[in-house]
């Protein structure tokens, strides 16, 4: 496959409502859309680097730089026979997983279309529907949180996740469990706590949580092993896991009992599959996280989540959860049974809404 042309778009999409975590409040989402053309086929990917360096050191600006000056030149104009060949072409670039994942996703889509296969099939997916949950940002009052949960349950979501931060944690957990004693329920701290808060997490053991996501530092694996020893509730690592090697270390140290996989965070679908396979061999369940992707990134997430060891509902909400109008057709919806259909058409399985894509594009450049 000769890589003939690559296009980058910096997009900015307004959220339907502010999304608050321990890292701050977002009102819109900035990502990079990657388009790769070759031999009559077009592949689409999304780099989930954001406008700020709060979740990751990567931003839209750094990802654009790495894509433009290093990753794209390594493959543009060349004949690339498979994904691994492309990865090898830019293996000298250290880090910058979100930049790499955006380009790799477009290549996966390109190759899948050239073979007339769905992305799910190309990745080794085994499911035609995936279980999905919803993530709710930090709320100011218990009543508004409970109302939101009620609405999402009515929409069909199987699992509820709430963001927590010091001072806005156990009281919300208690309120949710009192109102909804049977739902699948988990919390996400986004690295907001320290080991000194261990008593708080011990209290959460009493509320039948599915898991506690990333309670400690975003780079930590070791201290999570100390915390997990003291808890019945499974810890799930997110920000700490950037590679298969991190996954192996976390499991060997018993730092967690669940792994969250985000292709952007680990560098793409290839590394995600390695993490998935290793966790399956160790009987460690995985689930798919979310980065408020547009429909392009969401399509990839759904395809990856169709692999067999994604056994917990993922943060793969409907398009309308975050955006008034998505940049793909059809938009993603949640079925009444709390699942989402896995696209079966070639590649990511959805069409680009070019009118909407143009509307949200801030900068476009072709190579």
Image (cartoon, rainbow, N blue to C red):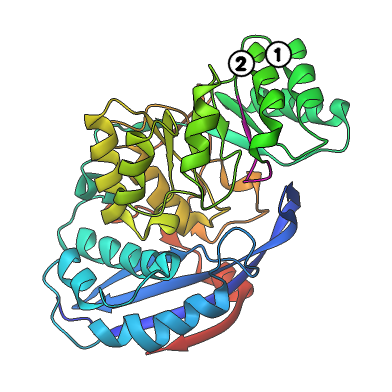
- Give the class, few, some or many, for how many residues have Cα within 10 Å of label 2's Cα (few <14, many ≥20): some
Residue at position x 76%, y 13% in the image: 179
**Is 178 inside the magenta-drawn segment?**
no
Main secondary structure found in the magenta portion: loop
Mark 1, other Cα within 10 Å: few <14 / some 14–19 / many ≥20: some
Count of numbered tags: 2
Give left or right: position of 245 versus 165: left
Residue 28 percent location from the top left of the image? 70, 62
Instruction: Report x, y in % for residue 107.
Output: 27, 67
- Magenta-highlighted residues: 186-193
Residue appearing at x 38%, y 56% in the figure: 266
Of the 4 image quadrants, the one containing the C terminus is bottom left
| Residue sitting nearer the eye, 302 or 285 | 285
In the structure shown, which secondary structural element does the residue marked by tag 1 occupy? Answer: loop
Front residue of 340/104: it is 104
Q: Secondary structure at mark 2?
A: loop
- Magenta span has 187? yes
The residue under label 2 is: 183
Callout 2 touching callout 1 (CB < 8 Å): yes
Q: Which residue is mark 1?
A: 180
């Amino acid at each position: 496959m000769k890589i003939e042309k690559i296009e980058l778009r910096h997009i900015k999409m307004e959220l339907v409502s502010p999304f608050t975590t321990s890292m701050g409040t977002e009102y819109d989402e900035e990502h990079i859309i990657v388009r790769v053309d070759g031999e009559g086929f077009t592949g689409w990917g999304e780099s989930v680097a954001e406008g700020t360096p709060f979740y990751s050191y990567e931003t839209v600006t750094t990802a654009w730089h790495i894509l433009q000056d290093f990753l794209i030149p390594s493959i543009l104009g060349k004949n690339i026979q498979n994904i691994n060949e492309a990865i090898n072409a830019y293996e000298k670039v250290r880090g910058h997983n979100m930049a790499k994942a955006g380009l790799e996703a477009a290549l996966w889509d390109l190759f899948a279309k050239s073979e007339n296969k769905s992305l799910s099939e190309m990745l080794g997916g085994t499911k035609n529907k995936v279980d999905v949950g919803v993530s709710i940002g930090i709320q100011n009052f218990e009543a508004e949180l409970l109302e939101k949960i009620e609405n999402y349950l009515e929409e069909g979501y199987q699992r509820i996740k709430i963001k927590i931060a010091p001072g806005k944690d156990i009281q919300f957990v208690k309120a949710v469990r009192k109102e909804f004693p049977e739902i699948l329920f988990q919390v996400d701290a986004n690295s907001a706590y320290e080991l000194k808060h261990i008593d708080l997490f011990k209290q959460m053991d009493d509320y039948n949580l599915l898991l506690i996501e990333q309670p400690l530092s975003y780079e930590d694996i070791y201290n999570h092993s100390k915390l997990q020893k003291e808890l019945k509730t499974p810890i799930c690592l997110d920000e700490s896991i950037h590679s298969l090697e991190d996954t192996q270390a976390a499991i060997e140290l018993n730092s967690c009992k669940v792994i969250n996989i985000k292709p952007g965070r680990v560098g793409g679908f290839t590394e995600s599959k390695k993490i998935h396979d290793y966790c399956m061999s160790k009987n460690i369940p995985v689930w798919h996280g979310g980065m408020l992707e547009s429909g392009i990134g969401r399509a990839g997430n759904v395809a990856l989540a169709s692999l067999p060891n994604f056994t917990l509902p993922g943060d793969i909400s409907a398009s309308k959860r975050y955006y008034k109008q998505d940049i793909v057709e059809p938009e993603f919806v949640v079925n009444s049974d709390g699942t989402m259909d896995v696209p079966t058409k070639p590649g990511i399985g959805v069409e680009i809404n070019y009118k909407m894509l143009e509307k949200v594009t801030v900068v476009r450049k072709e190579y």
